[in-house]
């Protein structure tokens, strides 16, 4: 990175941070705009680490000089980047990119970086990994990379001292599948840890959180994002997504019954009013009960065009007072204690 910033007088084109690929070397200069003109930020030949990529993502506008337009074009065509992972049309390239990024994540976290930087890169890589899972073919779950990411999170939660509130402060609240999936998984992991789940159970509940809404891939987008009240037929369609997701996970190579059941039953309620089976109380596996609570909490705190978002306090109040017959009150109390 260039330390001395030079004032220049030149024509520029805007550059999105998403177009810069982690683990690449940029062949062009990158500038930012100041009140007195454009100043250079990164010189051609700079290696883009995951940490640097995360910092660039926080900058609203970047620029490339028009004199380097052809070089930038070649770079863009070569990588065809999207988020932290290089999303390309061929599965083999996608596999290779995710593998490299996940392994780089582990090496990065072992270095001397701030707590905030660790959380940012964990979230950034996780959102991108989940986006790949939701975009991929039906049964492609990138299980090797999910395993690497899961072990990384278990390590971080176990030894780093990072609190869940620090994660929540940096979590995205965009209403999309990959964001909700990762947010729920991290919340569920911390809650299960506070509930004294065993290490293998922590792994199961985290993976179930990642995949709990995978069945939404089969639900029409307009139904999932409808503002008004759903019709009876539409709601019946929505109720199929836990079964779709559980079947996808099984067919994709995960044969663990605890993960499967947590996904299948995460919309069951203690009073029997849930779906798809109408299970009651102790018939609902504890992993599914944890996912159910974290699913509702994150959904309430996410931004929605039809209602905005609730604060953590108000979301917990709704769950404790209005959903006490559906959600395990012992788990709700533990979540409240964890977040305060």
Image (cartoon, rainbow, N blue to C red):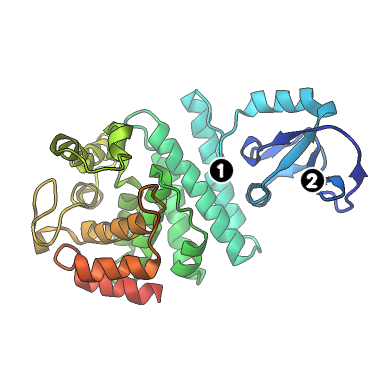
Tell me if residue 289 comes above or below residue 28 in the rendering.
below
| Residue at point 16%, 54% (across, down) | 268
In screen coordinates, is 21 left or right of 46?
Answer: left
Q: Quadrant of residue 10?
A: top right
Tell me if residue 190 comes above or below residue 83 in the rendering.
below
In screen coordinates, is 301 left or right of 327?
Answer: right
Tell me the number on the disc at residue 33.
2
Q: Quadrant of residue 248?
A: top left
Q: Residue 110, percent across and down?
A: 60, 60
Say if residue 243 shows up in the picture: yes
Q: Nearer the viewer, residue 141 or 127?
A: 127
Which of pointers 2 and 1 indicates the residue nearer the eye? Answer: 2
**Mark with earlier residue (2, 1):** 2
| Residue at point 33%, 40% (across, down) | 225
Tell me if residue 125 comes above or below residue 216 in the rendering.
below
| Residue at point 73%, 37% (across, down) | 25
Marks 2 and 1 sit apart, C-alpha to C-alpha, by 30 Å
Q: Residue 274, percent across and down?
A: 13, 52
- Residue at numbered disc 1: 101
């Amino acid at each position: 990175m260039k330390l001395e910033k030079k004032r220049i007088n030149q024509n520029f084109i805007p550059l999105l941070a998403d177009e810069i690929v982690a683990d690449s070397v940029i062949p062009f200069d990158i500038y930012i705009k100041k009140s007195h003109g454009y100043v250079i930020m990164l010189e051609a030949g700079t290696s883009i680490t995951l940490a640097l990529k995360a910092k660039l993502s926080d900058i609203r506008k970047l620029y490339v000089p028009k004199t380097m337009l052809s070089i930038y074009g070649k770079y863009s065509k070569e990588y065809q980047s999207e988020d932290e992972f290089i999303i390309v049309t061929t599965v083999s390239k996608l596999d290779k990119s995710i593998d490299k990024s996940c392994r780089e994540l582990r090496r990065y976290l072992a270095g001397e970086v701030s707590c905030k930087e660790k959380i940012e890169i964990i979230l950034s890589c996780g959102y991108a990994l989940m986006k790949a899972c939701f975009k991929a073919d039906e049964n492609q779950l990138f299980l090797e990379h999910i395993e690497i990411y899961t072990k990384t999170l278990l390590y971080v939660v176990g030894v780093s001292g990072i609190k869940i509130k620090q994660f929540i402060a940096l979590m995205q609240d965009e209403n999309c599948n990959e964001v909700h999936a990762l947010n729920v998984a991290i919340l569920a992991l911390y809650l299960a840890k506070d509930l004294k789940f065993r290490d293998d159970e922590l792994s199961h509940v985290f993976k179930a959180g990642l995949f709990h809404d995978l069945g939404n891939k089969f639900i029409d987008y307009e139904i999932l994002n409808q503002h008004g009240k759903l019709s009876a037929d539409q709601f019946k369609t929505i109720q199929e997504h836990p079964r779709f997701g559980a079947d996808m996970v099984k067919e994709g190579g995960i044969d663990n019954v605890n993960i499967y059941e947590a996904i299948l039953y995460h919309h069951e309620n203690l009073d029997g009013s849930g779906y798809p089976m109408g299970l009651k109380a102790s018939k609902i596996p504890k992993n599914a009960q944890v996912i159910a609570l974290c699913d509702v909490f994150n959904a309430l705190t996410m931004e929605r065009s039809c209602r905005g978002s609730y604060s953590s306090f108000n979301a917990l109040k709704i769950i404790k007072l209005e959903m006490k017959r559906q959600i395990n009150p012992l788990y709700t109390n533990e979540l409240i204690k964890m977040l305060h």
